Amino acid sequence: MATTWLIRNAQLLDLGANDREAVLRPNTSVLIEGDRIREVSDRPIQSNAAQVIDAAGRTLLPGFIDCHVHVVAASFNLAQVAQWPNVLAAYRAMPILQGMLMRGFTSVRDAGGADAAIARAVDEGLIIGPRLFPAGKALSQTGGHGDFRPRTDWLEPCACAFKVGSLARVVDGVDACRVAVREEILKGATQIKIMASGGVASPNDPIHFLGYSRDEIKAICEEAANADTYVMAHAYTGRAIRRAVECGVRTIEHGNLVDADAARAMAQHGAIAVPTLITYEALAKEGKALGLPDESVRKIEAAHAPALQSLEIFRDAGVKMAFGSDLLGESHRLQSEEFRIRAEILGNAAAIRAATLTAAEVLKREGELGVIATGALADLLLVDGDPLRDISVLLRQGERLDLIMKAGQPVKHRTR
């Protein structure tokens, strides 16, 4: 029998229509039946069947959504992760998933690596973690951001499509790209990820390189749309971003080197940005010591230095921004620090909106995730403090979160 919960005396975080309208609404009650919110009211709700949680004036907000994670990336050395035995790679993802949930992230979108089997294991309770929206294997051209084969005089075919620890698969040509999209969707991908530019973590692709031809990107986007889903693209430079959205890409990941023209193109096409600033801070501070290859260490500064400015460029062009972290290895513990970076540039309300309302829009789950409303999934957080005034109450490992509820089930409940 489903459990009924009644949360009383909460300050409900209402983000309003824009960041300036964000307020805390006192004396709010929320009734939860099963996995859904049944009622939200500023008047007392009566229920004889409900177990009562007294919020005692603490802040109630929706569970967070991280739109760019790699739950199988248990090391900075991604080429090494791709060689791990499948069972080992899967087991090493388990503490990463649990850590995300205990920081208040009740849903995450995996940007390459995790598959439908890991998502199912979470859904069935075999693994403790957030609701998972997997991209399966990201698609990379030969020599692109997802190709971790070393430079040599003979390239063996990439076996990356078959390894749990591999974040991407190598595929070239329009027809092969179409087949790859169909295969990833058949295997359970909820969206398709492509590498539309070079990157930091891979060895042989400078950041300014372009990934895939326009025809290949258009074919990938068409196949995704045929399956009623969309394409997310790793892209750094303005040139890579513009051609991606012009070809039909819906979300741009990272975008550190975006320019005003590319941002305007995103706004024109309704594309959403998913900046991931905390990972570059982590890479710059810890990458070399924790196993990032020398080739990647040399590329960090080119992506790290302009990252903060990208937030302002996106904002000024009217581009929506969702929350992403993109952390690797031991740096997964820094996931919540993305709030700090966003808040310093955009303000606290905008940082929270990115991880709730906008993130739910990325997942195409508006009204169901990232919001406290009748009919929404009961993903709820109760925090000791006011995050509109002090973003630090959301940081670190969820120390100030007294309640974490996912789909109507408390996974952490600390009483006063």
Image (cartoon, rainbow, N blue to C red):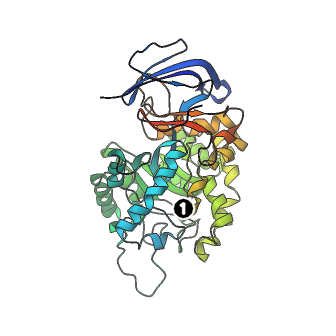
Tell me the residue at 49%/66% (across/down).
145
Residue 364 pos. (x, y %): 42, 37
On screen, residue 324 above or below 305: above
**What is the three-letter code of the residue carrying label 1?**
Leu
Which residue is denoted by mark 1 in the rendering? 328
* Label 1 SS: loop
Tell me the residue at 33%/52% (across/down).
116
Q: Residue 314 occupies which quadrant of the picture?
A: top right
The C terminus: image quadrant: top right
View extreme (front): residue: 416
Residue 388 pos. (x, y %): 68, 32
User: 282 left or right of 45?
Assistant: right
Tell me the residue at 46%/66% (across/down).
146
Between 321 and 95, the one lying in front of the other is 95
User: 302 left or right of 188?
Assistant: right
The N terminus: image quadrant: top left
On screen, residue 169 above or below 414: below
User: 123 left or right of 394?
Assistant: left
